[in-house]
Image: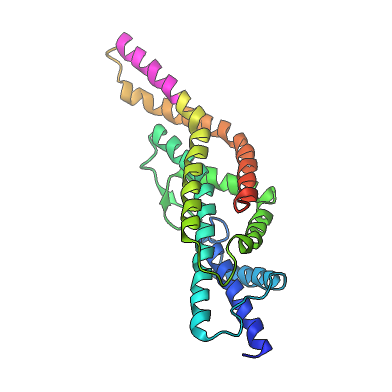
Amino acid sequence: MDAAGNVVTAFVLVLARVSGFMAVLPIFGSRSVPLRLRVGIALAVSLIMASVIPPAPVAGADWVVTALVLVQEILTGLGLGLAVAIVFSAVRQAGLVAGQQMGMSMAQIIDPMTGEEADPLAVLLEMCFSVVFLAAGGHHLLLRLMVSSYAAFPMGEPPAAGVMAQAIVEAGVLMLTFALQLAAPLLAAFLVLAVVLAILARILPEMNILFESLPLRVGLGLFMAAAIVPLLGGFTRLFGEWLSQFLVT
């Protein structure tokens, strides 16, 4: 294989990892982003990264080895993107908890980011977090994560499936932790409301507690959701710190 072929092979391998990474990201991989724009971003990022990343050791190898490395790069990009997407969805999970407590779990809308039905409050909180994340320069951290991934998972070496699986599991644990932290004030408020409604049910047994509690739940949920929005800045900082330390060890 000549020099031009080696350059093309190195670019394609970088493009495979970048494309797999961006395909599952919650913002860049969203269905609301036009396909041409997503492909253009992947090509531009791959072109820049291919110029700074050392050439792949498989350049010049036969097509079987190159194909195997190509599949490895795609899987590595998908694994990294999946871990990031799992932690990113902590805000959505907190919104789902809020919607369930408000009794709005049946009020589904079409999520513009996924094209599927979702809880309206969860979609609102996730969109607010996406804006805050991009405004804080989170996309720079994603690009830095892609570059540092070549130190943790070098191109051309056998994939470390155990390490990748452990990273995804740890991302899931972190997502649940963040979601509970964000939803904790709301859960505490609804617990107090449940106690108050229980007392009213004993004092006024003729009152229809279920019917009267519906507007109270919706109003309290909207008030607490508005109180959670300022906390998204702190979660953005924690999420950025996790991205910076994700592949350090």
Residue 194 seen? yes
Residue 23 seen? no
Q: Position of residue 18 (x, y in %)?
A: 59, 67
Q: Position of residue 20 (x, y in %)?
A: 53, 66
Residue occupying the far top of the picture: 203
Q: How many marks?
A: 0
Residue 144 is left or right of residue 163, and the answer is right
Tell me what residue is drawn at x 49 percent, y 30 percent. 184
Residue 7 is left or right of residue 103, and the answer is right
Tell me what residue is drawn at x 46 percent, y 49 percent. 169
| 105, above or below 155, in the image | above
Would you say residue 11 sits in the magenta stretch?
no
Q: Position of residue 4 (x, y in %)?
A: 67, 87
| 142, above or below 52, in the image | above
Looking at the rendering, which quadrant does residue 143 occupy?
bottom right
Scheme of image coloration? rainbow
Residue occupying the far left of the picture: 206
Q: Position of residue 201 (x, y in %)?
A: 31, 14
Would you say residue 202 sits in the magenta stretch?
yes
Magenta-colored span: 190-204
| 51, above or below 4, in the image | above
Tell me what residue is drawn at x 48 percent, y 52 percent. 166
The overriding secondary structure of the stretch rendered in magenta is helix
Residue 239 is left or right of residue 98, and the answer is right
| 24, above or below 69, in the image | above
Tell me what residue is drawn at x 52 percent, y 33 percent. 181
Residue 133 is left or right of residue 73, and the answer is right
Looking at the rendering, which quadrant does residue 241 occupy?
top right
Quadrant of the rendering where the N terminus is positioned: bottom right
